[in-house]
Amino acid sequence: MIRKYVLPALAVAGLGVAIFTVVAGSKATVPAPPVADPAQPPYRAFVAGSGIVEASTENIAIGTELPGVVSKIYVQIGSRVKAKDPLFTIDDRARRAELATRRASVQVAEAQLADSKNQLALAESITDKRAMSVEERDKRRFAVQKAEAQLAQAHAEVTSIETDLERLTVRAPVDGQVLQLKVHLGEFAPTGVLATPLILLGNVDSLCVRVDVDENDAWRVRNGARATGNLRGNKDIRAQLEFVRFEPYIVPKKSLTGDSSERVDTRVLQVIYGFERGELPIYVGQQMDVFIDAPDQTLATLVTKGAR
């Protein structure tokens, strides 16, 4: 008797749960509010692009010409440097020992040259031609020439070691600020192109923005066009940008904004704009939303057709 009523009740309860689940799942998901309000374009017609802030000298990845263990570091993150200031030094003890050996070789070569010259002077001072053969005189002349060549070689070897010693100290190529310092005392510093540079350096007194413009809009961007950049995350931090140059080779897009609708196969024209940093809290590597003043597509199309 119990089974007669329990099974239908369970079926009805299951049906009710299923209906509730379907109704609950069919409700529209309320999108989360944006972290910050998006920036608004200041121009009636414009081309928008995302930009990455970089140093005015571009971000310079500092490397070393000679590999070795780092023995001295002269800077720290944020240090201001002038061109030719030392950044770090590779252990130079082996080179200095070799330099001492080469300098000793120079002294030996100088002594040999002096002796050869004395022997030649003695031979040439003999007035009686029968006292020494012509062959012996020529041999002493060749000995002087050989000693001079050996001395020149010894001096060249000293210069080579001194050059290597100079190259073991890595110096700043331009005035700038140390943006990253990824090398430490006692670490081995390799040569070549590294995934993470030993030191990242650049001039940040004025900054640049590398703007990615979709290739479909690239033809609308004019040389010298005005532009405004808004810092990603705070649209109130804004900078008026000054056109610097085009990078005229279209490249695959690498600067991704994280937008779910963003295409990763986009090719872009990179436009470089500059601005004075002043007191703006803008740092190298930050993203900016950039709006470039441009004619609307209809007008631009007419202008392009008229130029043909």
Image (tube, grey):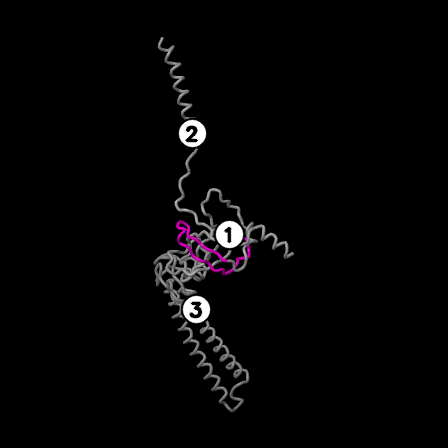
Residue 44 marker: 1
Instruction: Point out the tag, 2 or 3, that comes first from the N-terminus.
Output: 2
The one nearer the camera, 275 or 60, is 275
Say what amino acid the circle numbered 2 marks. Answer: Gly
Instruction: Point out the tag, 2 or 1, that comes first from the N-terminus.
Output: 2
The one nearer the camera, 146 or 298, is 298
The one nearer the camera, 214 or 305, is 305
Residue 212 x, y percent position in the rendering: 50, 52
Asked which secondary structure carries label 1, the reply is loop
Residue situated furthest front in the rendering: 44
Residue 123: in sight, yes or no? yes
In the picture, residue 54 is in which quadrant? bottom left
Residue situated furthest top in the rendering: 1
Residue 36 x, y percent position in the rendering: 39, 46
Mark 1: give few (<14), some (14-19) or many (20+) Cα within 10 Å.
few
> According to the image, label 2 marks what residue?
25
Placement of 238 over or under 27, stated as above or below: below
Asked which secondary structure carries label 3, the reply is helix
Say what amino acid the circle numbered 3 marks. Answer: Thr
> According to the image, label 3 marks what residue?
163
Mark 3: give few (<14), some (14-19) or many (20+) Cα within 10 Å.
few
Residue located 52% across and 84% down the image: 137
Residue 274 x, y percent position in the rendering: 46, 60
Asked which secondary structure carries label 2, the reply is helix
In the picture, residue 186 is in which quadrant? bottom left
**Span shown in magenta:** 226-251
**Which quarter of the image is occupied by the C terminus?**
bottom right
Tell me if 170 is positioned left or right of 134 in this view: left
Residue 63: in sight, yes or no? no
